[in-house]
Amino acid sequence: MIWIKAFVAGVLATLIFHQGVFGLFHMIGLVPAEPYNISPVPPFGVPAVLSLAFFGGLWGPPIWALIRGLSPLLHWIMAFVLGAIGPTVVAMLVVFPLKGLDVSAQTWIGGLILNGCWGLGLAVFMKLMVVRKNS
């Protein structure tokens, strides 16, 4: 059950934290694209934001497995760091080239910030969903 919660937390973190920060980037002119892109993506034609949220969900369980037992301060730091590094490296080295998108210093930095915020969102939602047992 905890892994389903981690998946859901990853989806929610994508829709709220990742896309929220992306929206801020758009508002201040750092990215031309708007958040919550509903354009269909191959191969199934689902809206891009739902595809992104699904993959955010897939990242949830492994990152939660790495941060769940850490001390409070380290928990939040590592949520940001692991959220920033893992998804960004995969996006820049695999996803962007497959889609024919340019990879630059700006996309790396933006990706690290966006995905780091996603990682914090994952940790927030997991804290809200996981009931701690007092022993």
Image (cartoon, rainbow, N blue to C red):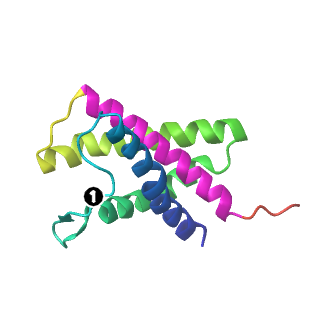
Q: Is residue 61 magenta?
A: no
Residue located at (68% from left, 63% from top): 130
Residue located at (56% from left, 38% from top): 78
Q: Amino acid at mark 1?
A: Asn
Q: Which residue is mark 1?
A: 37
Residue located at (28% from left, 45% from top): 91
Percent across and percent down for residue 97 are 15, 44
Question: From the image, which quarter does the C terminus lie in?
Answer: bottom right
The secondary structure making up most of the magenta span is helix
* Picture quadrant of residue 74: top right
* Closer-to-camera residue (42/66): 42
* Closer-to-camera residue (48/10): 48
Percent across and percent down for residue 119 are 50, 46
* Closer-to-camera residue (12/70): 12
Percent across and percent down for residue 18 are 42, 49
Residue range in magenta is 105-130
